[in-house]
């Protein structure tokens, strides 16, 4: 153990000496390692952070949830399936929610969702183009709706009777009332109809995954929504659908098959009729996102790999020069009893240490970059511990590979000839 520590310490001192005595040469040789590690950590950290943000946004649509819609999400309307077949499909109706609840054995929560825009007025202040979400019961069991202290969500009785009770987004509350914490209990008008603010939704932030913008919307019951808008609209868009969440231990794939049979019964389709509805599995979007970011990561690895190869040749060049400069020292060590494996280990450790130094410089540069990007982007960029560990392992392996040939040359030197070398 003491001998190993001695070898490590000597290798460390030699590497530091190399850095001090040949600063420019060492820096230029390690530059490739620095750029390679910078690319790897930078790409992995940025892509992982962005993927985490998008995946969280997709999860906000509802975990293990299927959307029953007239439109097939993600499919090109001008592709293999004619767009006119979609637009001619019947829009989901609120009556179908109860029928699905009665006939589906795998559904836990079911809610109708419609969206539109309206003008929101409070005293002399007015906001136009505000997103309006008309929902039925169970919506808050499928979506995560956090109400800030001092307010509440819409009660079940208010849903059943269609009372003019709403919850509003944090940004809307701030812009309209001036203080989101004081918005609960206020009376506003939605397209001229009086409504009572029951609560304010906790600030969510910008979403990359599409879906719901809870900061800039109001949520109200389906029955109150129906007094202002046409609930059987047949136009373009995904603003009229039914959300179905599976029971515990039931996969979304199983729920899709269950709902297919249920919806065909509800729509009274014969065995020869095509489905006039679409079943959109949210979990599939998450898998597609994961596959896309996997490809992006591979591209980042390819770019970084070229830099690492260049850096490896630079470190190998340093080690060849170092062996040549220390030939007499190597001969003296072997003459007084140093074994081949000791010489080999010292040079391999020194080579690995040089690569780690280059990697640390790259890591510092990435850290500075994350601070800059996090201040201007709508999501934080985080360097995960596993990425740092991966970078360290890459540096060590690359250092060993780069120094293996020079180290073997040093270990095999004849001590007599080496001592005589000037």
Image: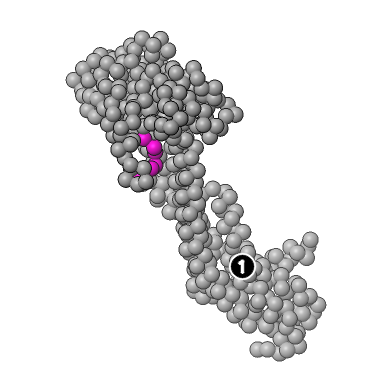
Residue that sits furthest to the left in the current view:
124
Q: Position of residue 59 (x, y in %)?
A: 47, 35
Picture layout, residue 320 above or below residue 278: below
In the rendered image, residue 130, in percent from the top left (x then y), is placed at 27, 28
The image shows residue 403 at horizontal and vertical percentages of 63, 73
Q: Residue at x 24, y 25 (%)?
A: 118
Tell me which residue sits at (59%, 75%) in the image.
316
| Observer-nearest of 237 and 84 | 84
Q: Secondary structure at mark 1?
A: helix
Residue at position x 48%, y 54% from top? 295
Q: Can I make out residue 250 in this image?
A: yes
The residue most toward the right is 337
The relative height of residue 187 versus residue 72 in the rendered view (above or below) is above
| Residue marked by disc 1 | 399
Q: Is residue 217 visible?
A: no
Q: Quadrant of residue 13?
A: bottom right
- Front residue of this view, candidates 76 and 406: 76
Asked if residue 397 lies in the magenta stretch, the reply is no
**Rendered-image quadrant of the C terminus:** bottom right
Q: Main secondary structure of the magenta part?
A: loop
Asked if residue 74 is among those painted magenta in the image, a careful observer would answer yes
Front residue of this view, candidates 118 and 180: 118
Crowding near the residue tagged with mark 1, few <14, some 14–19, many ≥20 C-alpha atoms within 10 Å: many
Which region of the structure is painted magenta?
Answer: 71-76
Residue 105 placed where, x, y %?
54, 22
Instruction: Answer with left or right where residue 233 lies relative to residue 396.
Output: left
Q: Quadrant of residue 335?
A: bottom right
Quarter of the image with the N terminus in it: bottom right
Q: Quadrant of residue 122?
A: top left
Q: Is residue 135 above or below residue 401?
A: above
Pick the front one: 234 or 196: 234
């Amino acid at each position: 153990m003491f001998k190993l520590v001695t070898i490590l310490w000597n290798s460390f001192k030699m590497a530091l000496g190399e850095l001090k005595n040949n600063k420019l040469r060492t820096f230029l040789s390690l530059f490739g390692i620095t750029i390679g590690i910078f690319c790897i950590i930078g790409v992995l950290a940025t892509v992982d952070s962005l993927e985490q943000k998008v995946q969280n946004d997709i999860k906000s649509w509802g975990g293990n949830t299927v959307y029953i819609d007239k439109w097939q999400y993600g499919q090109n309307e001008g592709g293999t399936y004619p767009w006119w077949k979609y637009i001619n499909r019947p829009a989901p109706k609120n009556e179908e929610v109860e029928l699905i609840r009665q006939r589906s054995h795998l559904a836990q929560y079911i809610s109708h969702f419609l969206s539109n825009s309206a003008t929101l007025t409070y005293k002399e202040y007015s906001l136009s183009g505000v997103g309006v979400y008309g929902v039925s019961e169970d919506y808050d069991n499928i979506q995560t709706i956090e109400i800030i202290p001092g307010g509440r969500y819409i009660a079940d009785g208010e849903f059943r009777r269609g009372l003019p009770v709403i919850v509003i987004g944090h940004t809307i509350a701030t812009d309209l009332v001036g203080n989101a914490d004081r918005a609960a209990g206020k009376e506003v008008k939605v397209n001229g109809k009086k409504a009572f603010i029951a609560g304010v939704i906790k600030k969510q932030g910008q979403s990359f995954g599409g879906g719901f913008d809870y900061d800039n919307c109001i949520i109200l019951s389906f029955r109150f929504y129906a007094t202002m808008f046409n609930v059987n609209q047949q136009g373009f868009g995904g603003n009229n659908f039914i959300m179905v969440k599976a029971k515990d231990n039931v996969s979304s794939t199983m729920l899709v098959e269950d709902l297919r049979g249920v919806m065909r019964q509800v729509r009274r389709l014969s065995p020869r009729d095509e489905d006039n509805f679409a079943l959109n599995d949210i979990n599939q979007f998450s898998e597609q996102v994961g596959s896309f970011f996997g490809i992006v990561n591979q591209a980042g690895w390819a770019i970084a790999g070229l830099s690492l190869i260049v850096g490896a040749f630079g470190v190998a060049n340093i080690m060849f020069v170092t062996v040549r400069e220390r030939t007499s020292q190597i001969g003296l060590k072997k003459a007084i009893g140093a074994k081949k494996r000791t010489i080999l280990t010292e040079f391999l450790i020194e080579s690995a240490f040089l690569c780690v130094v280059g990697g640390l410089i790259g890591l510092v540069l990435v850290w500075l970059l994350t601070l800059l990007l996090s201040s201007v982007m709508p999501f934080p960029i985080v360097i995960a511990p596993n990425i740092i560990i991966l970078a360290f392992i890459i540096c060590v392996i690359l250092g060993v590979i780069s120094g293996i040939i020079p180290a073997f040359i040093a270990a095999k030197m004849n001590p007599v000839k080496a001592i005589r070398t000037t």
